[in-house]
Structures are given as structure tokens and as C-alpha cells.
Amino acid sequence: MALVPFLFGVAGREELPGVALVRLLGDLGLTPGAARSLLARMRRDGLLAATPRGRGADYRMAGPFLQAFRQIRDGARPAQPPWDGGFHALFYSVPEAHRAYRDRLRRAATLARYGLMQPGVLISPVDARDALAAELGAEPPAGTVLHGRVELDLADAVAVARRAWELPVLERRYRDHAARLTAAVRAAPDPPGPSPEGLAAYTALFGGALVDTLRTPPRLPAELLPDGWPLPALLEAVGAAARHFGPPVARYVGEVVAASR
């Protein structure tokens, strides 16, 4: 699923023709049928919206993916507020008969960057209930979804944040991504030209780096992060790699989009 927002990012557009997306996903190893199924699933999940055009459709990003796309594009990360003593909490209990809703709730909460404090309790540094409500609609009659606040002292909050957002795992990944991207720029002073192979190599280079940058809540207080938190260094490495390798890839994607009009 991450391939689609990545392609929007390479194109620098919030809307792309379906024909172009299917071809570009084909360059990345998906069959046309698999590419169309992926786009349809993302529409059902509210991550893409479509506008009919001729015999096909134009797709535009929506929901949390659109917010994440704009955040990466604009290089904006909201300021980190000081620790105020608590997390916004979402308490849920949804019976098995409404399993589909429960799965949608968990997925929407993950995209909104809630962390799992314990079964049935999701936490966030900000109150994102409006975003969740927009994604989910009304809760099922037999289910319970409540919003509240969990107060913790700083030491306990640090421990909870480490578990809820897997901060030690992300810390290692951020350092590995940054080192890999920096080494790639040094190893290839002349980036490859525009081509399907260049797009595939560019996608493989970034791997999960861009997805992982979005896994830390953007307003998690600095007091809750590990010392020497490497996300700023990773964002610098991502920017340097994009400036070095990106222009030929963007040119190729632009040619595919233009040919699909």
C-alpha cells in the first residue's frame, strides 16, 4: 500500500490518472490486476478518491494519506509541546459481531498515529477524535468507544511511550535508514537517467524509510523520546537522497503521466 503514496510523492501531485498509476505500479512489480485491486482497496479504506474520466478514473489522495503526503512534501513537522502530564486516550470495546468496525477503528487509529497502551486502550499526544469520526462514521450500537485522558508521571509516560510507539525499534530503523541513504549518495555521484529501472531502484532505495518517518506521532513531547533521537538526521538524509536521485525519476514519472492524458 505504501507504493501508491510514494508514487504520488515522486510525481509531486495529489491527483494522478489511474492508467498512469497502473503502469507505474507495473514498473514496481505488480500485475495490472493486482494494481487495480490495490487502488480499489485504498478507495474502500478512504485513502483514495476517484473522479471518472473517459473509460478510466483520476485518483487523488484522501484522509490520513493526504495529510502525510502534504507533511512530507512541505517538510513540516508540528512543534513538540512540553509534557503536560497526560495522553489523550481512546477506550474501546467492540464485540466480535462488529469485527469489521473494530478492524476499521484500529486501522484508522494507526493512521492517526495512536499508540497501543494496552488491549482496548489507544493513546495519542493530541486529541484526534474528529479525524477518527470522519473516517469511521457512527459507532455500532453494541460497541463502546469512549474518549478520555490518562494522567502519568514523567517516568511512567516515558516507559508507556516506548512500548506504545515501539520507539527503540524506530530508533534503530531511523539510524539504519539514514546511514543507507547517505552511503547510496556517496556511492553513485552520477544518478541513473529516467527509466522504469530507475524508478524501481529509487523505490527500493527508500524502502520503508518514508513510512517509518510517519510512525512517530508528530507532537510527541521531546521529554518522552530517547536521547539523541535520530529522526531529524534521517529527514536530512531523505532530503539529500531525493535531491540527488529524484529529478530523473520524477522526469520519467512525468512522462508516463503525460502519455496517459
Image (spheres, grey):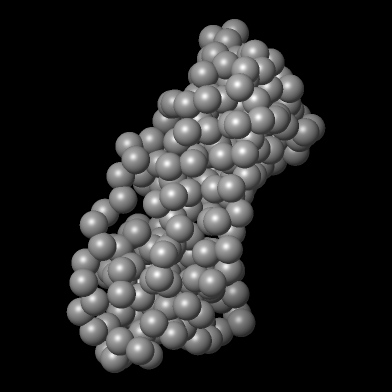
Please say if 216 is above or below 22. below
**Residue appearing at x 63%, y 35% in the figure:** 184
Quarter of the C terminus within the rendering: top right
In this rendering, position of residue 188 left or right of residue 115:
right
**Residue appearing at x 47%, y 33% in the figure:** 240
In this rendering, position of residue 246 left or right of residue 153:
right
Where is residue 5? Give x, y as percent: 53, 39
**Residue appearing at x 55%, y 14% in the figure:** 251
Q: How many marks?
A: 0
Where is residue 179? Give x, y as percent: 59, 48
In this rendering, position of residue 201 left or right of residue 3:
right
- The answer to whether residue 123 is seen in the rendering is yes
Q: Front-most of 27 and 245? A: 245
Where is residue 225? Give x, y as percent: 39, 71
Residue 113 position by quadrant: bottom left
Residue 26 position by quadrant: top right
- The answer to whether residue 57 is seen in the rendering is no
In this rendering, position of residue 54 left or right of residue 228:
right
Where is residue 45? Give x, y as percent: 53, 52
Residue 226 position by quadrant: bottom left
